[in-house]
Amino acid sequence: MKGLIEDHLLVMEKVLDLRLQRQNVVMGNIANVNTRNYKPRSLAFEDDLQSALKLDARGKMARTDPKHLPSEFDINGFQGKGLTEYKPRMVFGEDAVDLDKEMSSMAKNSLMYNALTDIISKNFTGLNTVIQEGSR
């Protein structure tokens, strides 16, 4: 049980760190909205996270339910990738950063960050309840 909780927290810690990094990238894009020839950056990590959490079940503990935590996860080998995947718009008098897109990206990222912190908080509240009930 001890290892299960620690692995779970390490994954959540890494995802929170990557969400913070994404927020910093988006804020950098917004700060450069009026900078000529600035190419917006992005940070993508969701696909890599999903593939890192899927394990080959041959000879290992199998995940029989999508809600199960994986039996192994190497948190040290997982990182987000910075990308400049879309080409800037070339319109005279406008910059490459789409302010509406960046603001919506920031809002979505903030919501996902806050949702994960709420989940972590509720996990600790539930664990605290179990500990208190067990000590009676």
Image (cartoon, helix red, strand yellow):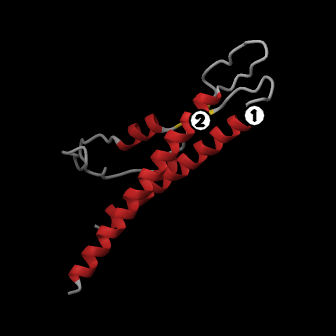
Residue lying furthest top:
91
Q: For residue 95, which quarter of the picture?
A: top right
Crowding near pointer 1: few (<14 within 10 Å), some, many (20+)?
some
Q: Amino acid at mark 1?
A: Asn
Disc 1 marks which residue?
Answer: 32
The span from disc 2 to disc 1 (Cα, nearest Å) is 13 Å
Whether residue 75 is visible to the viewer of this picture, yes or no, is yes
Q: Amino acid at mark 2?
A: Met
Q: Quadrant of the N terminus?
A: bottom left
Badge 1 marks a residue whose secondary structure is loop
Mark 1 or mark 2, which is nearer the start of the sequence?
1
- Report the front residue among 96 and 58: 96
Relative image position of residue 85 (x, y in whole percent): 60, 23
Crowding near pointer 2: few (<14 within 10 Å), some, many (20+)?
some
Q: For residue 101, which quarter of the picture?
A: top right
Whether residue 11 is visible to the viewer of this picture, yes or no, is no
Relative image position of residue 36 (x, y in whole percent): 81, 24
Relative image position of residue 63 (x, y in whole percent): 23, 46
Compared to residue 44, the image places residue 4 above or below, namely below
Q: For residue 120, which quarter of the picture?
A: bottom left
Disc 2 marks which residue?
Answer: 103
Is 87 left or right of 32, judged from the image as shown? left
Q: Residue at x 33, y 40 (%)?
A: 54
Badge 2 marks a residue whose secondary structure is helix
Compared to residue 56, the image places residue 98 above or below, namely above
- Report the front residue among 36 and 49: 36
